[in-house]
Image (tube, rainbow, N blue to C red):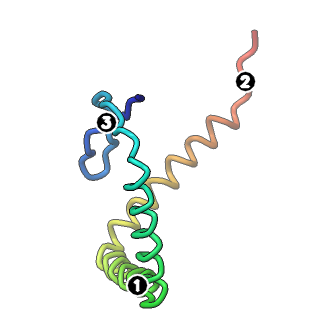
Amino acid sequence: MGEVEVFEAAEAGGVASRVGTTPAPPEAAPAAAAEERTTALMDIACKQETGLVRIWNEAEAAVQRTLIQQNATAFDGVLTERRRMLGEADAVLARPAPGP
């Protein structure tokens, strides 16, 4: 039995941090695996018949577009700062390498 890494959720804008490992779940019994495959196939068929994924994607994209528009000034600031940092990085990389 292997282990699975466990991460602590990150605050907004942060990075998740590794907090340890936990034992991996045991393998599913063959009957459960067959049952799970049947359920998964039925789920896929339902999503295809109803267009759920397309509808969900369109709704999520609309919400994101609205949030982007409402926060355009903040995003402009992020873009300006990113361009500044990349310009500084380009300047550092353009310098000649120090000699021996």
Q: Which mark is residue 6?
A: 3
Assign a secondary structure to mark 3: strand
Residue 19's spot in the image, x, y percent? 28, 30
Badge 1 is on which residue? 52
Report crowding for label 1: few under 14, some 14 to 19, many 20 or more residues within 10 A (C-alpha): few
Query: Which structural element holds mark 2?
Result: loop
Q: Amino acid at mark 2?
A: Ala
Amino acid at circle 1: Leu
Q: Position of residue 15 (x, y in %)?
A: 34, 42
Q: Give above or below for 70 relative to 22.
A: below
Left or right: 18, with 93 as reference point: left
How far apart are labels 1 and 3 at the CA level?
A: 31 Å
The residue sitting at the bottom extreme is 50
Q: Quadrant of residue 76?
A: bottom left
Q: Residue furthest front?
A: 31
- In the picture of the structure, the residue carrying the numbered disc 2 is 97
Between disc 2 and disc 3, whose residue precedes? Answer: 3
